Structure formats: structure tokens, C-alpha cells
Image (cartoon, grey):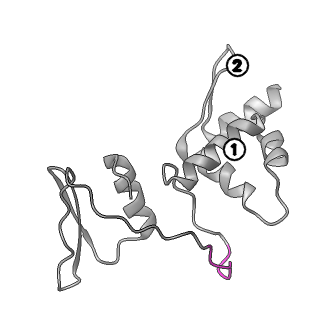
Amino acid sequence: MCATNSFLRSLGVEVHASGHRRWPDDVKAQVVAETLEPGATVNSVAERYGVKPNQLSAWRGLAKRGKLVLPAASEADALPAFAPLVLREPEESVEREALPQSGDLLRIAVGAVRIELAAGTPARRIAEIVHALGAEA
């Protein structure tokens, strides 16, 4: 168990004397991403990181709901992943601004918070900002 704890600490996981662990979101995301590799199973990845498979499945659920941002695929020729598209009417309580016509800026508006980003901002960064604002896509 000492080797596992040393490995986890090297990743940034806080390991307490009681055995309790605090996993940073980026480490959770990396572990979840490993379960999506061809041939990987939740059980094998969970065993490698010393976490219970049901906990890892819960993290996968967070990723599916957009609450955990996964790292980009490391392979340049990785096949694109597809997700279902869900369209819904905007909630009345959340005011959203339309994108500018010029295409130079991307505006995120949630309640009274307004953020302007360059049009070329990576999708991962946009997802991180939306996650930090507590907004749901």
C-alpha cells in the first residue's frame, strides 16, 4: 500500500493517515480517460490506481454530465468521439447573450457574469470556465 500511496502522491492526490484520499479533478479526469482506451476496463484501471470500481464509475458519470473535463486525446490520429446532441429551450432565469456577428469574440453570460474570450479559445478552456461558473450546457 505504501508504493500505491507514493504513486498517488506523485500525481497530486492527497493521502491522509486515515486512508482518506482527496483526488484533484485533473487526476480524476486522467483516470477516467484511461477507462476509455481500447481494451481497458473499469476494474483494471481502478485496481491500478487503488480505487474502488464503483467510485471510478461515479467519476465516469461526472464526465458524462460535463462536470469533469477529460484531457484531449494524446494521439493526433485518434478517432473522433461522438455524443448525443440534446436541444432544449433556454431557461428563463439564465440570461444568455447571442454571439457577436464579427466572430472575433465569444461571449459567455450566466446571470450577471459576462466573460469575453477570443474566438480561437480551445474548447477545453471554454468547458473549464463554464464548469467554474457552475452553469450547465
The answer to whether 4 is drawn above or below residue 100 in the figure is above
Point out residue 44 in the picture as x, y percentages from the top left corner. 85, 47
Q: Is residue 79 magenta?
A: yes
Picture residue at 72% right of the left edge, 56% below the top: 34
Picture residue at 83% right of the left edge, 26% below the top: 1
Seen from this angle, which residue lies furthest left?
112
Looking at the rendered structure, the kind of residue marked 1 is Ser
Give the side of residue 111 with respect to residue 32, left or right. left
Tell me how far mark 1 sits from mark 2, CA to CA.
Answer: 20 Å
Give the side of residue 62 with respect to residue 132, left or right. right
Picture residue at 20% right of the left edge, 50% below the top: 93
Q: Which residues are magenta?
A: 75-81
Looking at the rendered structure, the kind of residue marked 2 is Gly
Residue bearing the label numbered 1: 57
Which residue is at the front of the view, 48 or 93? 93
Quadrant for the C terminus, please.
bottom left
Point out residue 20 in the picture as x, y percentages from the top left corner. 65, 21
The answer to whether 4 is drawn above or below residue 99 in the figure is above
Point out residue 85 in the picture as x, y percentages from the top left corner. 49, 71
Residue bearing the label numbered 2: 19
Give the side of residue 34 with respect to residue 85, left or right. right
Looking at the image, is mark 1 or mark 2 earlier in the sequence? 2
